[in-house]
Structure formats: C-alpha cells, structure tokens
Image (cartoon, helix red, strand yellow):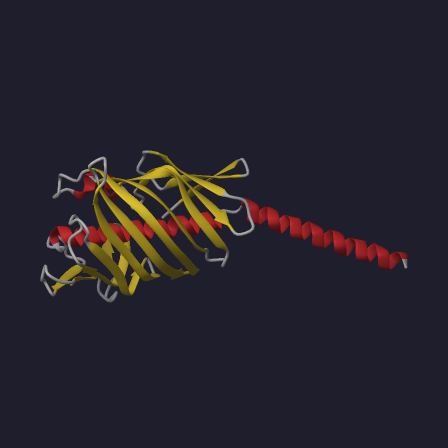
C-alpha cells in the first residue's frame, strides 16, 4: 500500500512539475512575437513593391516584370507584377528571393484621394514562404494635419515551416516625403491599428499598436526592416501580454520583447 502511495506521489509530482515547466517555457517564449514580426515585415515589403509599380512600372528593373492591363482611368485597372516561376533562379528583389505574381487592381493611383488598391497573389513565394490572401489600401485624403492618410486591411496566410494566419486593420499617415514623388526612399509614415491571428504553433494572438509605429523607407537601402520605433502588444490566448519595442529610430531588425518584466532580444527577417 505504501509503495502504491509513493508511486502515485511521484507520478503526481512529475505531472505538476512538467505542467509548470511547460507553462514557464510558453510564458518565456517569443514564437508568437517572431511570427507576427515576420508577417508584418513581409507585408511592409508587399507595400513597397505595390508603390514601386505606380512609380515607374519597373522600367528601371530587370526583375520583376510589370504588365499594365485595362489602362482606363474611368474604371478598375490592373497591374501584374511577375517575379517569374523560379527557373533557372528565383528573382532577387529587396534582398529576398521571389517567384510568382502580385496582382494589383485599383480605382486610382496610390496618391489619388479615395482610391482603393487591392493586392492579391498568384503562387507568390518569398524565400520559399507561400503568401496568400489580400491587402486593401484605401486613400482617405488629407487629415486635419494636412497629411495624406490610408486605411490598410490585411488578411493573409503565410506557409513555410508551419502556417501563420494574420488579419489587421491599420491607419497610416504620410508624415514626410510626399512632395518628392521620384524618391520613395525618403518616405516616413506613422501607423496605428489592431489585428489578430495565430502563430506557426497554432496559438491564437491579438495585436494592438500601443505607441505609433514609424515606418522609414530609407531603411530599404540597408535591410528590409522599415519599422524604426514604436510599441506593439501581443496577447496570446491564455498567456501574458508581450510588448514589442521597435527601437530608437535605427534602421535594423533588432527588437526588444518585454514579458513579465524580463527583456528578450530578437532579430526579425
């Protein structure tokens, strides 16, 4: 009888220890944060490619190719951005290997008030990650500060090692660089918004931008991480809130995650 009680105590202790240890690992992990940052980086990248399409239709680039269809300002038009099929090699653009197509339909150009630009994907891969879904940008015209503002709605799945699902609505204010049309790399935006999704582990999370994010496109000359400052909170279902600090206006991919008073340093890509 004593032997049975002893064995039962060991089993119970082992179960409790394992459960606590698992919770501690989950609580100290940054998988949700890394997956979110990865998705955010990819769609900031999509935004840059779409804006490129309206600037010069890729005339100065050997890759990708651009096809303009239904060029009629009175109705919906289309631009197809084609990165090829990966043979013999994937197209290298902004430091990333790409294949497939980005399809842009629009009622007006990026700078046109009330224009709606919808981006979808056809077998589009970035560094072998399969991008699906859509991105809708609505130009809301100028706000009380005299700056052009946009609403950006994203619904996507990103499949690589596992699948990230992400939906978000963001407000973007163009605070610098609007008047230098031929130089997109001096553009700076302020961004607010919310979102939700799940990480590659299947865990659900919510996203809230708690301090305006600053997007600086000059960073593209150094890397693909364009968010240089601001804060976002990630709230995984059933676990503690993580706070992402994007840094202090430096063009790098290094971020700090604060969880339960502890700091973790991660690198996005």
The one nearer the camera, 210 or 97, is 210
- The picture quadrant where one finds residue 7 is bottom right
Find residue 40 and report its horizontal and vertical position in percent. 35, 50
Residue at the location (80% across, 57% down)?
Answer: 8
For the view shown, which residue lies furthest in the right direction? 1
Q: Is residue 41 visible?
A: yes
Residue 4 to residue 192: above or below: below
- The picture quadrant where one finds residue 73 is bottom left
Residue 190 to residue 68: above or below: above
Find residue 10 and report its horizontal and vertical position in percent. 78, 54
Find residue 94 and report its horizontal and vertical position in percent. 24, 50
Residue at the location (64% across, 48% down)?
Answer: 21
Q: Is residue 161 visible?
A: no
Q: Is residue 180 left or right of residue 161?
A: left
Residue at the location (34% across, 51% down)?
Answer: 169
Q: How many numbered marks have been drawn onto this rendered protein structure?
A: 0
For the view shown, which residue lies furthest in the front direction? 144
- The picture quadrant where one finds residue 266 is top left
Find residue 149 and report its horizontal and vertical position in percent. 24, 44
Q: Is residue 163 left or right of residue 170?
A: right
Residue at the location (37% across, 35% down)?
Answer: 247
Quadrant, the N terminus: bottom right
The one nearer the camera, 201 or 177, is 177
Residue 261 to residue 149: above or below: above
Q: Is residue 166 left or right of residue 175?
A: right
The one nearer the camera, 180 or 75, is 75
Q: Is residue 165 left or right of residue 64?
A: right
């Amino acid at each position: 009888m004593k032997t049975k009680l002893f064995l039962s105590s060991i089993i119970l202790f082992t179960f409790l220890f394992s459960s606590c240890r698992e919770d501690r690992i989950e609580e100290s992990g940054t998988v949700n944060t890394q997956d979110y940052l990865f998705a955010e980086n990819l769609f900031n990248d999509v935004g840059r490619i779409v804006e490129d399409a309206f600037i010069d239709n890729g005339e100065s680039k050997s890759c990708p190719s651009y096809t303009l269809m239904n060029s009629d300002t009175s109705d919906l038009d289309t631009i197809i951005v084609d990165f090829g099929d990966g043979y013999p090699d994937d197209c290298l653009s902004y430091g990333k290997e790409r294949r497939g197509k980005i399809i842009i339909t629009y009622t007006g150009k990026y700078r046109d008030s009330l224009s709606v630009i919808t981006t979808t994907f056809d077998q589009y891969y970035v560094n072998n990650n399969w991008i699906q879904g859509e991105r809708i940008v609505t130009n809301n015209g100028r706000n009380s500060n005299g700056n052009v503002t946009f609403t950006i709605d994203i619904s996507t799945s990103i499949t690589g090692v596992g699948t990230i699902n992400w939906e978000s609505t963001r407000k973007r204010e163009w605070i610098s660089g609007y008047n230098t049309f031929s130089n997109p790399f001096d553009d700076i935006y302020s961004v607010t918004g919310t979102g939700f999704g799940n990480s590659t582990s299947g865990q659900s999370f919510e996203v809230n931008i708690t301090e305006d994010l600053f997007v600086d496109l000059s960073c593209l000359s150094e890397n693909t991480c364009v968010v240089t400052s601001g804060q976002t909170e990630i709230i995984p279902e059933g676990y503690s809130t993580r706070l992402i600090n994007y840094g202090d206006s430096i063009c790098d991919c290094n971020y700090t995650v604060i969880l339960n008073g502890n700091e973790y340093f991660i690198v996005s890509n």
